Amino acid sequence: MLYKYMEINKIIEKVKEYNKDANIDLIKKAYEFAVKIHEKHLRASKEQYIVHPLNVAYIVAESKLDEQSVAAALLHDVVEEGNVSIKDLKEKFGEEVALLVDGLTKLTELREKSREKYEAESIRKMLLASTKDIRVILIKLADKLHNMRTLDYLSREDQIRLAQSALDIYTPLAYRLGMDKIKSELQDLALKYLEPGVYHELVEKVNTRFRNREKEIRDVIEILNKRFRESEIKVNITGRPKSIYSIYEKMKKKNIDFENIYDVVGLRIITETIKNCYEILGIIHSLWKPIPGEFNDFIAMPKSNMYQSIHTAVNNHGKIIEIQIRTKEMDEIAQEGIAAHWVYKNIYGDTKFDKKLSWLKEFLEWQKSSEDHKEFMDELKLDFFDREIFCFTPKGKLIELPKHSCIVDFAYVVHSDLGDKCVAGRVNGKFVSLRQEVKNGDIIEVITEKNQRPRNEWLKFVKTANARTKIKKSLREHGEQIITPIKEEEVKKNSILMVKGVKDASIVFSKCCQPLPGDEIKGLLVKNNLVKVHQPGCTGLKDKKKIIDVKWIDPSEKIIGFNIDAYDRMGLFADILNQIVQTKTNVEKAQARIVNENMARCIFSLKIRSMEHLRDLLLRIKNIKDVKNVDVGIV
Ligand code: MN
C-alpha cells in the first residue's frame, strides 16, 4: 500500500520545513505502531483506518507543532480503537506522548451510559488535560477537522449531531485560541451539513461575486503596489473572498440578503513592521475615502485571543473594499493562533500565554462541582460565546467581559472593593448609571462612595457569576434577604388610550401624522383589533366606515413606561437622560441594552405630572439625534 508511505513522507517533509532538528525517528516509530494497531480497522468510508491519523498528523504539522504532537496525532486513536494501554505508550514513546494521547482518549468507563453524558464527560476530560498541556486541544481540533472533512460517509443523523457539536464547542474553542484557519473551515463544514441548501447557494453567489470583481480588485492591488514601491514599503497583497459562514452569520444577524452584503471581498496586506502598517493605512486613506465606523486598530488594542491587525474599509467608486493590514508575525498568529505562538517562543512559563488559558482553567474550576452534564455543556457553550466585550480602565488595562455586562460587572472584575463601593460610571467621559451596558472599546471609570454597599437590585442587571457571588456575599454579611430577581425585559404596559367598541385593541400611532398626547385623535380599525391612531385631518383616515373613537387617558401622577429604539452611539443614553432631567421628571427606572450591532433600546419608567408634561417629554425624546421610535404606555 504505497499511499501510506507517501503520506507519512509528506508529513515528515512538512515537519522538516519548520524544524530541521525534529526527531523524525519518533514520528516514524509512531506511524509504524499505529499502522499495526489499526491494521484491521476501517473507516466509515471503507478506507484503511490509518488514513485518519495520518491526516490529523498532517494538519498538526501544518500548524507547525512539535514532533511529540505529530506522534501523538498518529497515535491518537490507538487506545480507543485498538485497546492499547497508556502504560504501553509510555514505555514505547515516552511520558510526553503518552500523556497527550491520554488527554485525547475519550473515557472508557462511561461508554454504556447515555451518549450525552459520555460526550460531556469526555470533553471535560480533554479540557482538563489541555490546561496542563495545551497541545491536547490543538491536536483535538485537528482530529475534529478531519472528521468534519469526511462526514459524507456517515448517516444524516450523525452528520447533524457532529456538525452541531463542531459549531457549539469546537469553533468557539478554536476562536478563543485564535486559530482562525481551523475555525473558519470547521464553521463552513458545519454549515454545509446543517443547512446544505443555504450553504451551496452561498458558495455559488460568493464565487460569482468574486469573479465579477476580480478585475476591480486586481486594479486596486496594482495601484497600491505602485504607491508602496514609491514609498519603499515591502508588502504582499492578497485578495480573498470571505468565509461562507461569516457571510451567513452577517446575513442572519443583520437580517439582510446577500445582495446587501458589501464586504464579500477583502484585501490583506502583509508587511514587515508595525510602523509600515500605519504608513500603509495613511496611504490607503489618502487614495480612497474610508467608510466611517469600519476602522479598527487591533494592533494598538489586540483581541484577547492575541489577534492583531488594522481593519479598514474604503469606497472605490461606490464599491466597498475591506482591507486588513498586519505584519507577517501577526498574520501567522491570526491564522494559527496559539499554535503560532508555540513556534515563536517556548510557551511554558510565559505568563502572557498562561493568561490566555486562564479562562479555561477558571471555567473548569467553576464547573468542578457540576454533577449535571447537561448544565456543564450549556455553561461551556455560554462561556465560550459570551466573553466578547473588551473594554479598558482609565489606565488602559484591558478588561474582558461577557456580552451585556454592566458597569457593576466591570467594577468587580477590576477589584472587589471597586464593585462593592460603586455608585455610577463614567464611560468615555460621560456619566452613566450602574446598569449601563459596556461596549467594545469603552474606557470606563468607576465612581465610588465610601458608604456604598452592594444592593439587592443589582442582582437584576449584573451578568457575571463573579459579580453575583460577591453581591450575595455582602448582602448575607449585612443580614439582608436575597431576592431572586425576575429578569427585566421591556416594561409591560397598558395603552395610554381608550378605544371605544374594540375588544383587546392593539394600538399603533401612525407614522404619517404622529399625534402627540393631548392632540385631537381618531382611530382607524385596520384589522380585527388593530387600531391605527391619526390626527383628524390626516389623509391616512380615508376609509370613513372604519373610523372609531379614541381618547387619551389622563396620565397625571401615573408611571409611564418609555421604550426608546435608537441607532446606538456613544452618549445616546446620556442625551436621553439629559432631556428627561431638564423636564424635572422623577425617574423610577432606567435601563439600556443593545438590540443588535446598530440598535439600542433604552427603557425608562417616568412619573408624569400632566398631559402637557408627557407631551413635552415625548417631543424632546423624539427630537434626539438617532432616536428611531418611542413607544409609551402606563406601567
Ligand atoms: Mn480521531
Image (spheres, rainbow, N blue to C red):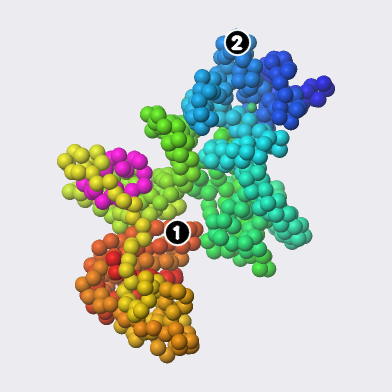
* Residue at 36%, 84% in the rendered image: 549
**Magenta stretch: includes residue 535:** no
Q: What's the residue type where badge 1 is placed?
A: Val
**Residue 423, disc:** none
Q: Which residue is mark 2?
A: 88
Q: Percent x, y for residue 6?
A: 80, 25
Q: Which residues are magenta?
A: 453-471
Crowd rating for badge 1 (residues with CA inside 10 Å; few <14, some 14–19, many 20+): some
The answer to whether 387 is drawn above or below residue 24 in the figure is below
The answer for how far apart the CA atoms under marks 2 and 1 are is 56 Å
Residue plotted at (45% across, 59% down) = 595
Q: Nearer the viewer, residue 618 or 283?
A: 618
Q: Which residue is mark 1?
A: 595
Q: Nearer the viewer, residue 194 or 202?
A: 194
Q: In the rendered structure, which disc, 2 or 1, sits on the residue that comes first in sequence? A: 2
Q: Residue at x 37, y 76 (%)?
A: 502
Q: Quadrant of the N terminus?
A: top right
Q: Within 8 Å of ligand 1, the CB of disc 2?
A: no
From this view, report whether residue 337 is shown above or below residue 577: above
Residue 398: percent from left, percent from top: 42, 45
The answer to whether residue 19 shows anywhere in this view is no
The residue lying toward the viewer, choosing from 396 and 450, is 450
Residue drawn at (39%, 65%) of the image: 572
Q: Quadrant of residue 520?
A: bottom left
Q: Quadrant of ligand 1?
A: top right
Name the secondary structure under disc 2. helix
Residue 262 image point, x, y percent: 64, 61
> What kind of element bears circle 1?
loop
- Quarter the C terminus occupies: bottom left
